[in-house]
Image (cartoon, rainbow, N blue to C red):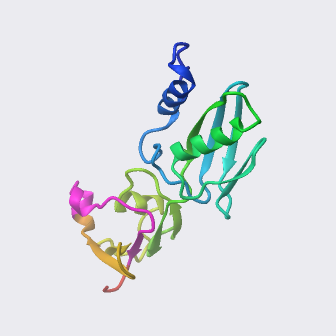
């Protein structure tokens, strides 16, 4: 949801900061969010002339923006991207540009559900998703899925391989928060009909 910007702001940088804080959504989409391939962004030029541009981060990590062409944004925070685009626009294209960058869709962060679910595959990670919500998104356990045999594979932070987290689905379904871990990008949920 967008908000109107009050007329009284402190200089062009004050307007930029205020506008950014009002347009960035809650959750993972904040100024420090690192943009990835597939993410969809809305860039609003507020002045000198209003302009809204929707862009998708290409496989090479670039977006294309009017006047300045390609901008490499993969791994860049929204705040840093905002400053980069504004700086390049100010370099001979627009006078005192003020803009905001809004993350519309997170598509670079994904998780995978494999095994005995109705729709195994890779899905976009949303803020606050857990193992049980991921299984629900994959349309639940398949006919031969065993809900007591669920594990979460998570990439190790400082080495190769995965950590294995066994999920007690019965406890998770009964509201056991510790038994329904929140997902991270790259996680894989495996639902097995056999032993691990």
Q: Nearer the viewer, residue 132 or 97?
A: 97
Residue 132 horizontal/vertical position (percent): 35, 60
Q: Farthest residue in the top direction?
A: 8
Kindly identify the residue that appears in the image at 52 percent across and 16 percent down: 6
Asked if residue 38 lies left or right of residue 142, the reply is right
Numbered range of the magenta stretch: 171-191
- Decide if residue 149 is in sight here: no
In reply to whether residue 170 is colored magenta, the answer given is no
Q: Nearer the viewer, residue 32 or 188?
A: 32
Q: Farthest residue in the bottom direction?
A: 195
Kindly identify the residue that appears in the image at 40 percent across and 75 percent down: 190
Kindly identify the residue that appears in the image at 21 percent across and 62 percent down: 171
Q: Nearer the viewer, residue 186 or 159?
A: 159
Q: Quadrant where the C terminus lies?
A: bottom left
* Quarter of the image where one finds residue 96: top right
Asked if residue 160 lies left or right of residue 52, the reply is left
């Amino acid at each position: 949801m967008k908000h109107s910007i009050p007329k009284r702001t402190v200089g062009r940088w004050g307007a930029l900061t205020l506008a950014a804080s009002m347009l960035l959504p809650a959750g993972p989409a904040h100024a420090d969010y690192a943009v990835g391939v597939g993410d969809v962004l809305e860039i609003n030029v507020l002045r000198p002339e209003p302009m809204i541009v929707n862009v998708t981060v290409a496989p090479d990590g670039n977006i294309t923006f009017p006047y300045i062409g390609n901008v490499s944004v993969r791994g860049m925070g929204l705040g840093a991207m905002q400053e980069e685009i504004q700086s390049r626009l100010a370099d001979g294209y627009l006078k005192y540009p003020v803009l905001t960058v809004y993350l519309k869709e997170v598509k670079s962060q994904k998780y995978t559900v494999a095994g005995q679910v109705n729709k195994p595959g890779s899905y976009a990670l949303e803020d606050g998703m857990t193992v049980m919500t991921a299984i629900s998104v994959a349309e639940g356990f398949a006919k031969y899925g065993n809900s007591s045999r669920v594990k979460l594979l998570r990439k190790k932070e400082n080495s190769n391989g995965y950590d294995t987290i066994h999920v007690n689905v019965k406890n998770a379904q009964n509201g056991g928060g510790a038994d329904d871990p929140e997902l991270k990008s790259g996680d894989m949920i495996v639902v097995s009909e056999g032993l691990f």
